[in-house]
Image (tube, helix red, strand yellow):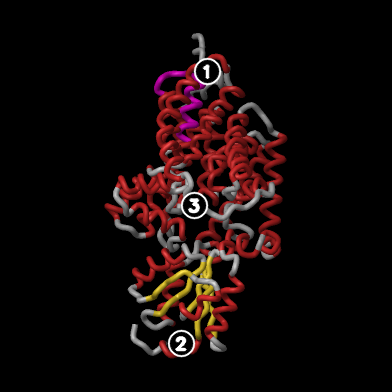
Amino acid sequence: MTAPAYSVLPPAAADVAPREQRRAAALLLALLVCGALLRFYRLGSNSLWVDEFATLRISLLSLPEIFAENIRNKSFEPPLYFWLVHGVVGVLGSSETALRLASAVAGTLSIPVVWLLTREVTSNVNTALLSAALLTFNPLHLWYSQEARPYALFLLFVCLAGFSLSRAFRAGGRTAWAGFAGFTLLAVFTHLVGLALLLVAWGWGIALANGRKLIRPLLIQSAVVLACVGPLLVAIAAATAGAPDTGSPPRAPTGLEIPYTLLTYVAGYSFGPSLRELQNLGTRAALAANLFQSGLAVVILAGLALLIARRLQRDMTGFAILFAIYVGVIFLASVVTGKAYSIRYTLPGLIGFLGMVALAISNSDPALRRAWLALVLALFAWADAQWFFSPAYWKDDSRAAVHWLSQHLPPGATVAVAPAYATRVLTHYARLEGTDLHLVSAVPAGGWEAQRPAALVLTRLHHVPDQVGLVTAFRRLAGPHLLKQRVVGYDMWLDDQLAQNSAGQPR
């Protein structure tokens, strides 16, 4: 039988014996269960950090208001994810668990989808199982699967779009091409960096397929996606023209962003220095404080890179393109726009990287394969354990900060907070605590006498350039009786005499 005109990728996997099918299905089911357990374990234990609180604030709006709010902002997040969270919150309430539920479900479902994608690209069931296993325990994917932000859902749609595209390249058909366009649109309406999927599609078409046969369907699907997204892009451009930038402060790229991205792909944010240490202490000091774990992660990453380089093959091309385009596009966008480079925007590159690792390991000698798999999974498990049980890697604990303040300050006390945006999430937990604290933005030293705060709270120090001046001004105001407390993500100072005087007051 003659192959279809579109059959330009390796032939689909041959029929597998029923016994092997049952084995593969059992292993995939076991991975799915493990992935779900990891992603739902302690899902609501960490309090919301500032970006997650933004999700709460937006999701409590009406559907039209959510659309308008997301058109006005500059975070490149269309309303689809927030509409979904709005529905969850309407049914389950606004707890931390409910807010993160969509991400946990999306992260769990990504495991079988990555299996499908890898099997489609490589025609190898064992490589597909290995790729799914790597994603199951990957600490970076676990982080975003437990965060009330759109990235896990975005990644799920990217994987579904990739699977559909691979199917379309192999055999054509309207269903596969429509699936690619549809899932690409869902990805874009979850996060605008989904548009890079069009570049991935053309890269796959040029590198893997007969370009002349695919020009017409690729042009049609690209036109459909751009036509559907165009009005949204125009609305965002019009709404944000001349508006102040409310995003993170610009940071000039150094080139170190790319190797650090690769490091997070194998170690996440919970191995070696934490994000907070990198932001507050600087790279050199944070690495010096975590030399062993940092060195171990670098050695494993270098070994995997060498293994991939030695096992280069055609099956890796699609994964390499997915990785290179997402990392390259986000880095280039940072260079051009000045917007700080962020690993979360490169998350689809993780799938490309893990696909290359799975292929390199599966094509190694049996002894080397077992050794590498054990080493990588041990690193993942170590990082996952630290994410769950080491406070150094937890998100900012706003709940604990408010609780400590409420135990040491009289009702109605003013608390100065920097950066200013942190007042919102702290006010949220103050309301939940039922405590009467007046949380305000910390002002420069000249305004302290009028403000008369009873406490000073600093968090996310990389966004507080005048932290030394703020602490010095508060020390002068509070006098010699100064009490300092540190909880995860927060440094707090208050007048110890005031704390002692309020200790006996009823709460």
Vertical placement of residue 272 versus 231, above or below: below
* Disc ID at residue 214: 1
At x 72%, y 35%, the residue is 310
The quarter of the displayed image where residue 295 is located: bottom right
- Residue farthest to the left, as pictured: 91
Element carrying mark 1: helix
* Disc ID at residue 76: none
- Residue farthest to the top, as pictured: 1
Vertical placement of residue 260 versus 398, above or below: above
Vertical placement of residue 306 versus 171, above or below: below
Element carrying mark 3: loop
Verify whether residue 164 appears in magenta: yes
**Neighbour tally class for label 2: few under 14, some 14-19, many 20 plus, Cα within 10 Å:** some
Viewer-side label of 3, 1: 3
At x 57%, y 83%, the residue is 476
Residue type at mark 1 is Leu
Distance in Å between CA atoms under marks 3 and 2: 40 Å
Which residue is tagged 2? 498
Residue type at mark 3 is Pro
Q: Earlier in the sequence, mark 3 or mark 1?
A: 1
Verify whether residue 245 appears in magenta: no
Q: Position of residue 166 (x, y in %)?
A: 51, 26
Q: Earlier in the sequence, mark 2 or mark 1?
A: 1
Vertical placement of residue 331 versus 449, above or below: above
Which residue is tagged 3? 244
Quadrant of the snapshot with the C terminus: bottom left
At x 39%, y 68%, the residue is 427
Q: Position of residue 69 (x, y in %)?
A: 38, 49
